[in-house]
Image: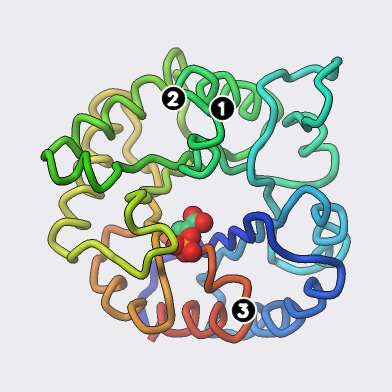
Amino acid sequence: MTNKYKYFVANWKMFGDIKTVNSIYTVIKASKSRNFSKAKIIYCPPYTLLNTFVNKLKKTKVEVGAQNCHQSSSNGPFTGFINSKMIKKLGCKYVIIGHSESRNSGDTNILINKKIKSSLENSLTVIFCIGETFKEKKKNKTKKILINQIKKGLKNIKNIKNIIIAYEPVWSIGTGLVPKNEELLNNILFIKKFLRKNFNYKKTRVLYGGSVSPYNIKNLNEINQIDGFLIGGASQNSNKFIDIIKKSFN
Ligand code: PEP
């Protein structure tokens, strides 16, 4: 068994209702076992379920995060939005920012930077998603894209202690496609090195996200430099989610 602490972030996207929340009971139970002692499990359900998750997970070691937030730290006339202050007040500890699906819905690098700043101001840990599209990968632009997303997303942020990076190649999300281990290791190392050099911080955790499943998790765990996983589809099935975590530790 590896001794390393690993993150398992469940991104439920725009799925789930009050009834499906009950399905996480088996995950809560499993989280108490010795096998899971090095697993940091974080649920990121849709806004409508945040309160239910926070209450359900209160006396457990499983934590809760939101999937996005508005860029304004203070409350105001922003119909349809929720800010980081509200998310924090609700009892969440994390927020995902910059997910490719949010970028596709209009989150630019500039907006992402504002959202990250407001989330840090409100003492949330940010799970900052970056990653290249298939077209960019084919044109050998991956590193350029990653640098651009990091530089713009973290502009004027000095302390990145409360930032977790989720490297998610866009072409891997929900497609069943996963980068080859060599390519993945290369990109993870590149991100870590870039952060170390430009932000003078050595300990940033870098997660991988994109079609993680019980079938590919053993192989992904061969890459020692991955500090955990951001899991979409498979995290909505508690048996699969538990399986992924279990297989990460033996
Ligand atoms: C995600 O939602 O960030 C994700 C990686 O989804 P999936 O695991 O379904 O590819």
User: How far is disc 3 from disc 2 in space, using C-alphas?
Assistant: 32 Å
Q: Residues within 10 Å of mark 2 (few under 14, many from 20)?
A: many
Q: CA distance from mark 1 to mark 2?
A: 7 Å
Disc on the earlier residue, 1 or 3: 1
Q: Which mark is residue 153?
A: 2
Q: Earlier in the sequence, mark 3 or mark 2?
A: 2
The amino acid on which the numbered mark 1 sits, given as a three-letter code, is Ile
State left or right for residue 249 relative to residue 33: left
Report the front residue among 96 and 63: 96
Coloring scheme of the render? Answer: rainbow
Q: Secondary structure at mark 1?
A: helix
Q: Is residue 203 left or right of residue 125?
A: left
Tag 2, which secondary structure?
helix
Q: Are marks 3 and 2 in contact (CB under 8 Å)?
A: no
Q: Which residue is mark 1?
A: 116
> Which residue is located at x 57 percent, y 71 percent?
235
Closest to the observer, 154 or 136: 136
Q: Amino acid at mark 3?
A: Asn
